[in-house]
Amino acid sequence: MRLLKELFENNRAWAESIERRSPGFFSQLAAQQAPEYFWIGCADSRVPANEIAGLMPGEIFVHRNIANIVNPFDHNCAACLEYSVDVLRVKHVIVVGHYGCGGVRAVIEDHYRGKVGEWLAPIRAIYQKYEARLHSDARARWDALCELNVIEQSAAVCQSPIVRQAWSRGQELAIHGWIYSVADGLLRDLNVTAASAEEADAAERAAIERVLAQAPI
């Protein structure tokens, strides 16, 4: 039980199936890493980046954490963003949340304390900011806050000095905000795509208003 043999067996079968379909795949993969995409997503086990996007190993650089938060004080996320933009020269940074996010629900229900509670502070601030304009229905409120979180985290990427410097030097780089539904396996674009600081501010405002307009006032 301690050795998790079934996972090694799964791994061997997976590697063999990849090699059968694409002979020499792993030897080529070992020689370079040149993804065009950097995915910032939730650590939820139901939201695997490669599988959702239909991409092979080596095609997407991934950072995941609870509730897909982009916190400027998170050195891990900042380092991944810097590496993806400055070294890998990705063309797209995609912030991906999902409906039914437990971290978002914890904020609504004021549930978590300890380290998880501290981590969720940025979402708590988003909830307090928009709470009065959210739908009274519990599920609709949860869905809307999941969307607003993606929009705000995408804006945080756009505001990062790493991204601003890339744009200022003319680097081709677009920031996107998407949301995934575990219920049907589909991604949805929240229309916050920006390839410049000017686009970012306008896209964020428009996307927020679209979400809030769905709630009765």
Image (cartoon, rainbow, N blue to C red):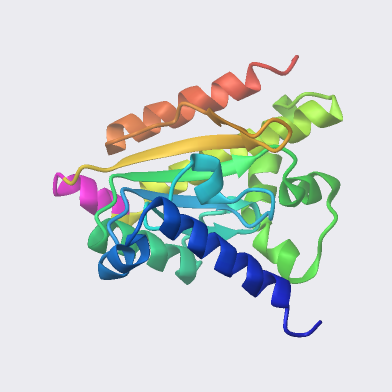
Q: Position of residue 47 (x, y in %)?
A: 63, 48
Answer yes or no: is residue 152 visible: no
Q: Position of residue 64 (x, y in %)?
A: 55, 58
Query: Which picture quadrant has residue 33?
Result: bottom left
Q: Which residues are magenta?
A: 163-170
Total numbered badges shown on the rendered structure: 0
Which residue is most to the bottom? 2
Q: Position of residue 121 (x, y in %)?
A: 66, 57
Asked if residue 9 lies in the magenta stretch, the reply is no
Q: Position of residue 201 (x, y in %)?
A: 38, 33
| Residue occupying the point 55% across, 42% down | 52
**Which one is in front, 63 or 133?**
63
**Which one is in front, 58 or 70?**
58
Answer yes or no: is residue 76 visible: yes
Q: Which quarter shows the N terminus?
A: bottom right
Vertical side of 129 occupied by 64: above or below:
below
| Residue occupying the point 65% across, 34% down | 185
Q: Please tell me whether the stretch drawn in magenta is mainly helix, strand or loop.
A: helix
